[in-house]
Image (spheres, rainbow, N blue to C red):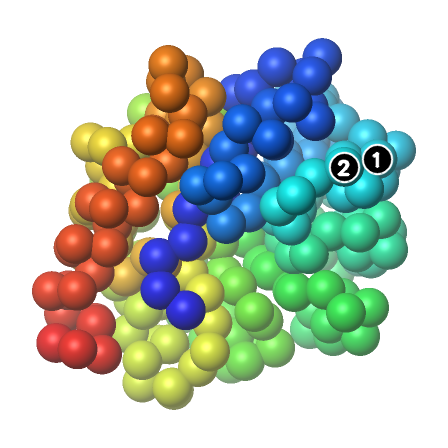
Amino acid sequence: MGVQISPSILAADYADLAGEVARIAPAADWVHVDVMDGHFVPNLTIGLPVVERLATVSALPLDCHLMVADADRWAPRYAEAGAGSVTFHVEAAGAPVRLARELRALGCRAGMALKPATPVDPYAELLDELDMLLLMTVEPGFGGQRFLDLVLPKVRRARELVKDRDLDLWLQVDGGVSAETIERCADAGADVFVAGSAVYGAHDVEAAVRGLRAQATAVTEHAWWSPHH
Ligand code: DX5
Ligand code: ZN
């Protein structure tokens, strides 16, 4: 699939979501929607009614990142609301395989997220149930945090698993991804990049997206895990 950029509207103007998505639409692949419930994470954002409306006005498919408790109950509702991809946290899911299958059955891409301290190896056997694995590079809950380099070995490990098993699984990183950190992520094996403040904090959001894509693409071509390598 190649490099994909998913700007996070957590750093955008919530009073004008349609306009904020339109600004990135010419350059981005997805719009990343952070759903927080004030329980799984100590912050509260938006929920189903807003996602449902956003799906109808957005030119980009919605990449919903659910930071909510009881993911088994809520994630399918976001698929029904029109998201193109729904990512639940494994720490919040009772039956991740069943949930991933349910999302796929609803015609949605199934993503699973791991907090920085959650290891990937215990989940090696269920990766082929997923379309995307999200490796958080900050503690979920807030935008604008510092990138955690300590997650990079896990990104490498996940890429090894994908390569060894010849899986069609996207590897997403989220948190502190910027011009300064995106190359390290791409080199480790990530191919889908979420960026909030690095995009919406820029004067020219479209140029910011194109810049991040160019950096990641250049590194990917020469990365250890690249098929062209
Ligand atoms: C954090 C969210 C991220 C956040 C990223 O819990 O999941 O998507 O918006 O924001 P930046 O890019 O500013 O770290
Ligand atoms: Zn996110």
Residue named by callout 2: 57
What residue do we see at 56% from left, 19% from top? 12
What residue do we see at 69% from left, 73% from top? 97
Q: Quadrant where the N terminus lies? A: bottom left
Q: Quadrant where the C terminus lies? A: bottom left
Specify whether 147 is left or right of 24: left
SS of the residue under disc 2: helix
C-alpha distance separating marks 2 and 1: 7 Å
* One can see residue 136 in this view: no
Amino acid type shown at disc 1: Arg
* One can see residue 205 in this view: yes
Residue 108 appears at what percent x and percent y?
72, 64
Please report contact status of discs 2 and 1: CB closer than 8 Å, yes or no: yes
Residue 48 appears at what percent x and percent y?
84, 37
Query: Quick check: 174 above or below 126?
Result: above
Residue named by callout 1: 53
Q: Residue 137: name its quadrant.
A: top left
Amino acid type shown at disc 2: Val
Residue occupying the far bottom of the picture: 165
Query: Quick check: 137 above or below 12?
Result: below
Of 106 and 115, nearer the camera is: 106
What residue do we see at 86% from left, 55% from top? 80
What residue do we see at 60% from left, 31% from top? 22
